[in-house]
Image (cartoon, helix red, strand yellow):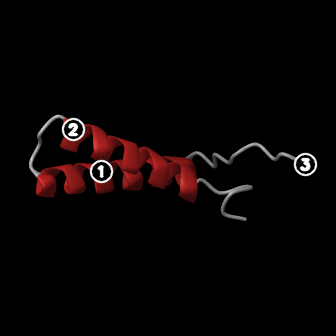
Amino acid sequence: MIFKKEVYATACLAGGLIYILLVHLDLDLSWAAFIAAGVVFLVRMTAVKYRLYLPRLD
């Protein structure tokens, strides 16, 4: 279900990519983690609010 319908993995992937980018840009690790967690939260809450799902690959 995680990879087929819900946006959990996609939100985590987005947060991870943001974290890597911010660390690469020499942002403090604490701030990078906080911002990345915020991105994960916002992506997930947006998906819940607007009932967004991943397309099914049957």
Q: Residue at x 63, y 45 (%)?
A: 52
- Indicate which disc residue 36 carries: 1
Q: CA distance from mark 2 to mark 3?
A: 37 Å
On the image, the x and y values in percent for residue 48 come to 56, 54
Q: Secondary structure at mark 2?
A: helix
The single residue placed furthest to the top in the displayed view is: 25
- Indicate which disc residue 58 carries: 3
Q: CA distance from mark 1 to mark 2?
A: 13 Å
Circle nearer the N terminus (2, 3):
2
The number of numbered discs placed on residues in the rendered structure image is 3
On the image, the x and y values in percent for residue 33 come to 23, 56
Apparent side of residue 44 relative to residue 5 in the rendered image (left or right): left
Q: Residue at x 29, y 47 (%)?
A: 19
The single residue placed furthest to the bottom in the displayed view is: 1
Apparent side of residue 18 relative to residue 34 in the rendered image (left or right): right
Q: Residue at x 68, y 48 (%)?
A: 53
The single residue placed furthest to the right in the displayed view is: 58
What residue does disc 2 label? 24
**Disc 3 marks which amino acid?**
Asp
Q: CA distance from mark 3 to mark 1?
A: 31 Å
Q: Residues within 10 Å of mark 1 (few under 14, many from 20)?
A: many
Q: Quadrant of the N terminus?
A: bottom right
On the image, the x and y values in percent for residue 24 come to 21, 38
Disc nearest the viewer among 1 and 2: 2
On the image, the x and y values in percent for residue 23 come to 20, 44
Q: Are marks 3 and 1 in contact (CB under 8 Å)?
A: no
Circle nearer the N terminus (1, 2):
2
- Indicate which disc residue 54 carries: none
**Disc 2 marks which amino acid?**
His
Q: Residue at x 66, y 63 (%)?
A: 2
Q: Residues within 10 Å of mark 3 (few under 14, many from 20)?
A: few
Q: Residues within 10 Å of mark 2 (few under 14, many from 20)?
A: few
